[in-house]
Image (cartoon, rainbow, N blue to C red):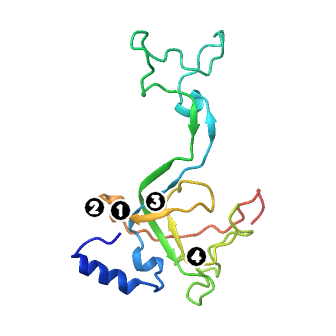
Amino acid sequence: QVNGGTVAQKVDFAYKLWENPLSVDDVFSKNEMIDAIGVTKGKGFEGVTTRWGTRMLPRKTRKGLRKVACIGAWGIGRVTFAVARAGQNGFHHRTEMNKKIYRIGKSRKTEEGKFNGQTNSDRTKKDINPMGGFPHYGEVNNDFVMLKGSILGVKKRVITLRKSVFPQTSTDAREDIELKLIDTTSKFGHGRF
């Protein structure tokens, strides 16, 4: 999607980008707030207590206690949409807004990104990968984006990153972040490193 300008200007802009490499730092910048769009982790068919967090019924309840006691009025002849029910949990399309970019790193295959795990406070010559790689992923060899917080979905699932929809005016959005340390100890077990 190309925004702004006339149709002819949009076509010219897109034509210049056609079949040319487009890196992450051409689109996003450090300390920018962006949105992450993707599909959440699937949990399968789950009961109403897990799916909606409803209160469990007392122990001496007939036919189970992880249920909803009353699912609506007698007279209307149907269950309304707002009543919590069992069903599919997870594997939903979601948009998480306002994720701050902490770092845009270069590929470790290049001279510029050879030690992409260094910071101004920690001058150890290391790359971004922890010892043994990231669990269920492996090692990051190409350009990467480091975001604040968690990202929806399982490892290796495709995530769409887009510019923030709303203008950012909060203190968090305008703050400049300078990383002190990137932890590269092993993410498996309780080892020394």
Viewer-closest of 165 and 177 = 165
Q: How far separated are the C-alphas under marks 3 and 1?
A: 9 Å
List the residue tagged with mark 3. Answer: 36
List the residue tagged with mark 1. Answer: 164
The image's mark for residue 186 is none
Q: How far separated are the C-alphas under marks 3 and 2?
A: 16 Å
**Residues at discs 2 and 1 in contact (Cβ within 8 Å):** yes
The image's mark for residue 167 is 2
Q: How far separated are the C-alphas under marks 2 and 1?
A: 7 Å
Judge the density around disc 4: few (<14), some (14-19), many (≥20) Cα neighbours within 10 Å. few
Viewer-closest of 188 and 88 = 88
Q: What element carries label 2?
A: loop
Disc 2 or disc 4, which is closer to the eye?
2
Residue occupying the point 53% across, 25% down: 54
Judge the density around disc 2: few (<14), some (14-19), many (≥20) Cα neighbours within 10 Å. few
Q: Which amino acid type is marked by label 1?
A: Ser
